[in-house]
Amino acid sequence: MNLIIDQGNSFAKIAVFDNDCLISIIQAEELQESLLETLLHQYSIKRGILSSVKDIDERLVEYLHSKISDFSVLSHETSLPFEIAYKTPATLGRDRIAAIAGAFSIHPNRNCLVIDAGTAVTYDFINDKGVYVGGNIAPGIDLRFRSLHQFTGKLPLVSGEGDVPFLGYDTQTAIRSGIIRGLTYEIEGYISEIQDSYPDLLIFLTGGSGKYFEDRLKYPIFADNNIVLKGLNSIIEYNAKL
């Protein structure tokens, strides 16, 4: 079995896969040795991988190396089943690599756009030749809400939950609609422009804020909150066969 650890900006996801089958998933605010120890006792883990967008806790990595015979930390030097054409691969977010790997594992040799709506919103494109071309990064929905509140004198901090009319009828709905509808139009703009060149484009939507856009986008999408975990597992499986 494979232990998959995805450390994001806001929380960590820890999953166990049996080959390609996801059998357990836990979300935690922090990666703790006690939690990992419980999983290692519960499952017969043979391989593991850690992907982190934060500074890595070397003590935790040493612990995992001591417990899992085939354990690795995802980096730009990790062997991947696709090519990266990004000019600075060392700076490419590990979560972005994993998300692309997830899309590629589900639909190899297809033109795919992966939209990850988390703390940041990332747009990443891999073509049907198996080449990751590149992508963009924008502020996520919570960052936009907090920025309006923090950098203005009177605007309140608004939640994404609630009515989202086309035109706001008070300050709360004006902010909520402006951000959610504005980000929806942004996402659709990326999809439309890429589809002009790649009409057969497949679109994947993931991330904690993806729920705000699933039913708003006018394009067919694959909504998959576990695509990063699936991508990390596919990277483990690929390297096991090398």
Image: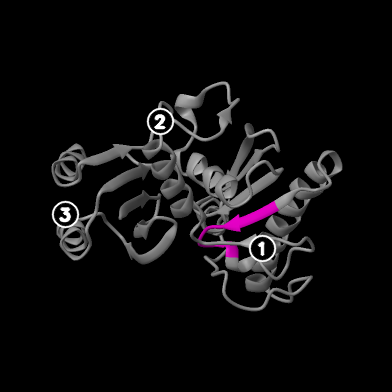
Front of the two marks 3 and 1? 3
Can you give x and y, in whole percent of width and height, for residue 90 in the image? 45, 25
Q: CA distance from mark 3 to mark 2?
A: 24 Å
Q: Secondary structure at mark 2?
A: loop
Q: Which mark is residue 78?
A: 2
Q: Which mark is residue 33?
A: 3
Front of the two marks 1 and 2? 2
Q: CA distance from mark 3 to mark 1?
A: 37 Å
Q: Residue at x 37, y 43 (%)?
A: 51
Q: Which mark is residue 40?
A: none
Q: Label 3: how many residues lie within 10 Å, few (<14), some (14-19) or many (20+)? A: few
Q: Does residue 57 belong to the magenta stretch? A: no
Can you give x and y, in whole percent of width and height, for residue 68 in the image? 20, 45
Q: Which residues are magenta?
A: 203-210
Q: Label 1: how many residues lie within 10 Å, few (<14), some (14-19) or many (20+)? A: many
Type of amino acid at the residue the image marks with label 3:
Glu
- First of labels 1, 2 by sequence position: 2
Q: Residue at x 55, y 48 (%)?
A: 105
Q: Secondary structure at mark 1?
A: helix
Type of amino acid at the residue the image marks with label 2:
Thr
Can you give x and y, in whole percent of width and height, for residue 242 in the image? 40, 32
Q: CA distance from mark 1 to mark 2?
A: 36 Å
Front of the two marks 3 and 2? 2
Can I make out residue 56 in this image? no
Q: Residue at x 46, y 44 (%)?
A: 95
Compare residues 231 and 28 and report the one nearer the observer: 231
